[in-house]
Structure formats: structure tokens, C-alpha cells
Image (tube, rainbow, N blue to C red):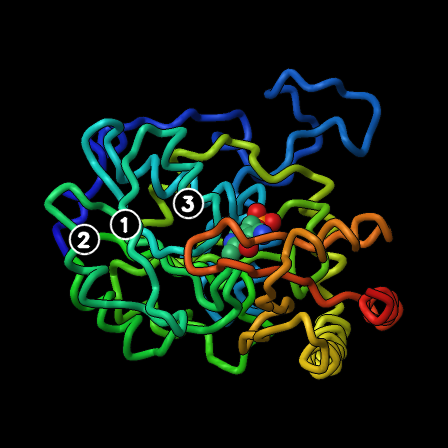
């Protein structure tokens, strides 16, 4: 890896972060007259803890990493934006991303005026590591990987991810939004080995908390400290912090949901494979299924008319004719299967 300070944008390296009232004093006191809050209307009149200490402590236990290795954001989308703003100088630096993949890497890069070089996956949706590394130049600061990948659904081979981490001198973002559904292990345990690794995870998928907007980035503490310096001081609100602490007690429930969704996924795939209009159902390690059909638009529109919404991915690179279907509750999947039976 290049020296960390060389990777950072100069203005971020020199940034003095905003110091909020709660930065300057965070202990237990009886009278808080420091932040110009309304003293009435408890319990939401106070700003949240800008460091999210209690929540990070709990997440540290669950994920078995130190709190200093955790960044929390308004969804993992916030972390995607922050990693670009930390390392990429607008108009000069660039990032490399796989294709097809999650669309926000491109959007966040576009907003920040950062060029994205896209490298196609192989025909069986694996990483083309030589092309990925070959697409980098001296201005490439980040490579974005996503495993299990959206929309293809597969986990990449561990040795290929390792090749990218070892072969690239900049930051490798590994988005593990769907890792709780996958048989593969998370790369979290390898954070200490890789100073250039940023792992993204989210509470929006297996944990069932998409509505409260809470995402995570994990990395060595020098990277996390920079993210914390850049973020809005109160980026995770009081309601989200409280609700997450409450819902995180239900670890068993999450495991049970995952178990049930994986069983449902198997049933759904078996059913889809019997359909004449399905040419292929791709292997998946996530809570969705990608299938290929000669008539994606027709099937999509037919389902919309039945008030069932799936994702048309047929315009996406390597996904010609492809539809992406999220695994729903048993009742929802039954509705889908019944509707497709009448197609
Ligand atoms: N990464 C991937 C691969 C995703 O598919 C999504 C959401 N669809 C996200 C990140 C964003 O998640 P969050 O809700 O945490 O912003």
C-alpha cells in the first residue's frame, strides 16, 4: 500500500473537523447549556452522541472487532460517499469498479467528479483480477468490489479478492451488504492483515432495518478516524441509535429470518427452473435470485399488472435478459409463483 498520507486528499489530510458541543463535553452532567438545544420536549430535544459509543460497543461485540475499527453511517451508502471524498481528488483521481455491480459506486463517484473505470466480470460472473489490476493507474485510489455481488448474487473466490488486495496500492472497498446470507466468511477477521481494506456491511438486509438507515464501514483505525472527521457530526440520529440497540438484541430472530429466507430461496429457484420462459437461474449467495429469460420486459410488465414488482436488470452489462427477484415471505413468494403459473 502507498503511504496513507499520500493516498488521502491533501485537504482531508489537513482538515480540522468541526468541534460540536458534545465533542467538547460528553460526560454525565445535570445541566446541559452548551448546545443551544430546546431544554423542553424530552426525550428528543438533545443531539445524539456524535461518536455513537453505546451502539458501536454493541456492534463491536456482535462483529468481534474493536470499536475503533467501526464507522457508522446513514446506510452504507454514506460510507461509499465518504470513502470517495476521503481519497479521491475531484477531476484528477479515479476509481475502478467491477461491472455489473451495485449502482451507487458510480453515482457517488459522479457526484464527486471522479472517473470510474469499469471492468467486466467474466462470463460466469467471477473477478477478472488481471484486468482489474491492469485498469488502475497512478491516480486510481479505490477499487470497489461487492461480494456477494449485486445483481449477480455470487460471492467471489477468496483467492481472487486476495489477489486484488495484495496487488493494488490503494484502497479496496469490499461491500458485504449480503454477507449474512452467504456461506462464505466475511473478510472482517482479516482487517489487521490488510491496511488497505475497507469492508462495508449494513443493517438493511438480513437484520431487517432498511427503514432506520444504518450502515457500517470497518477498517484499520487510521481510515476510520478520517471517515469520522469527514462525516456530519450527528450523522446517525437518536431514533436510529436507540432503535438499533433495541433490535440488535434480537440476534436469534435475524438468524431465523436468514434460515427461512434461504429455504424459501431454494423453493423459489426450484419452481423458476421448471418454467419454459426461464433459460437460466444463476447461482446465488444472497437474498435474491437472478434469472435469464428471452422476454424480460414482458414478464416484468405482466407482474407489475399483478402488483408484483421485481427488478428488470436486462439493460445491465452481462445481464442481457435478466430479472432480479428478491426472496419475500412465503406468502409473497407463493403469490409470485401463482402469478407466473398463469403467464
Ligand atoms: N451495497 C449493496 C451491494 C446494496 O445492494 C445496497 C442496497 N441495495 C447497499 C450497499 C446500500 O445499503 P444501505 O441501505 O446500507 O445504504
Quarter of the picture holding the C terminus? bottom right
**Disc 1: CA contacts within 10 A as few (<14), some (14-19) or many (>=20):** many
The residue labelled by disc 3 is: 105
- Percent coordinates x, y for residue 277 in the rendering: 67, 70
Indicate which disc, 1 or 3, sits on the residue closer to the N terminus: 1
12 to 295, vertically: above or below: above
Q: CB atoms at circles 1 and 3 under 8 Å apart?
A: no
Relative side of 222 to 30, left or right: left
Q: CB atoms at circles 3 and 2 under 8 Å apart?
A: no
Relative side of 278 to 56, left or right: right
Relative side of 316 to 215, left or right: left
Report whether residue 152 is seen: yes
Indicate which disc, 3 or 2, sits on the residue closer to the N terminus: 3
- The front one of 180 and 267 is 267
Q: What element does badge 2 sit on?
A: loop
Instruction: Tell me the CA gap for discs 1 and 3.
Output: 10 Å
Q: CB atoms at circles 1 and 2 under 8 Å apart?
A: yes
Quadrant assignment, res 161: bottom left
**Disc 2: CA contacts within 10 A as few (<14), some (14-19) or many (>=20):** some
The residue labelled by disc 2 is: 135
- Percent coordinates x, y for residue 25 in the rendering: 53, 32
x 47%, y 58%: residue? 67
Query: Which circle marks residue 96 in the picture?
Result: 1
Q: How many marks?
A: 3
x 57%, y 56%: residue? 202
Q: What element does badge 1 sit on?
A: strand
Amino acid at each position: 500500500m502507498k503511504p496513507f498520507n499520500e493516498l488521502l486528499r491533501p485537504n482531508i489530510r489537513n482538515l480540522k473537523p468541526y468541534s460540536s458541543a458534545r465533542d467538547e463535553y460528553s460526560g454525565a452532567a445535570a445541566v446541559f447549556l452548551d448546545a443551544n438545544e430546546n431544554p423542553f420536549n424530552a426525550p428528543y430535544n438533545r443531539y445524539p452522541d456524535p461518536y455513537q459509543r453505546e451502539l458501536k460497543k454493541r456492534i463491536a461485540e456482535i462483529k468481534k472487532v474493536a470499536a475503533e475499527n467501526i464507522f457508522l453511517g446513514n446506510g452504507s451508502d454514506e460510507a461509499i460517499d465518504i470513502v470517495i471524498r476521503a481519497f479521491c481528488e475531484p477531476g484528477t483521481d479515479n476509481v475502478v469498479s467491477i461491472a455489473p455491480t451495485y449502482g451507487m459506486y458510480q453515482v457517488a463517484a459522479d457526484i464527486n467528479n471522479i472517473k470510474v473505470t469499469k471492468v467486466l466480470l467474466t462470463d460466469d460472473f467471477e473477478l477478472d483480477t488481471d484486468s482489474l489490476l491492469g485498469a488502475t493507474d497512478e491516480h486510481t485510489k479505490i477499487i470497489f468490489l461487492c461480494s456477494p455481488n449485486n445483481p449477480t448474487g455470487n460471492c467471489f473466490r477468496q483467492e481472487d479478492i486476495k489477489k486484488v488486495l495484495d496487488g493494488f496500492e490503494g484502497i479496496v472497498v469490499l461491500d458485504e451488504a449480503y454477507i449474512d446470507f452467504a456461506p462464505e466468511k466475511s473478510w472482517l477477521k482479516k482487517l489487521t492483515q490488510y491496511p488497505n481494506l475497507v469492508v462495508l456491511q449494513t443493517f438493511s438486509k438480513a437484520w431487517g432495518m432498511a427503514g432506520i438507515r444504518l450502515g457500517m464501514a470497518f477498517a484499520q483505525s487510521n481510515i476510520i478516524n478520517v471517515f469520522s472527521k469527514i462525516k456530519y457530526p450527528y450523522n446517525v440520529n437518536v431514533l436510529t441509535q436507540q432503535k438499533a440497540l433495541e433490535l440488535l438484541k434480537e440476534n436469534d430472530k435475524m438468524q431465523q429470518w436468514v434460515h427461512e429466507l434461504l429455504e424459501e430461496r431454494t423453493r423459489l429457484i426450484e419452481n423458476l427452473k421448471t418454467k419454459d420462459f426461464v433459460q437460466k437461474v444463476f447461482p446465488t449467495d444472497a437474498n435474491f435470485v437472478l434469472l435469464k429469460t428471452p422476454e424480460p420486459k414482458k414478464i416484468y410488465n405482466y407482474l407489475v399488472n399483478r402488483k408484483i414488482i421485481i427488478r428488470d436488470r436486462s439493460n445491465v452489462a452481462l445481464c442481457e435478459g435478466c430479472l432480479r427477484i428478491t426472496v419475500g415471505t412465503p406468502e409473497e413468494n407463493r403469490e409470485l409463483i401463482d402469478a407466473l403459473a398463469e403467464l
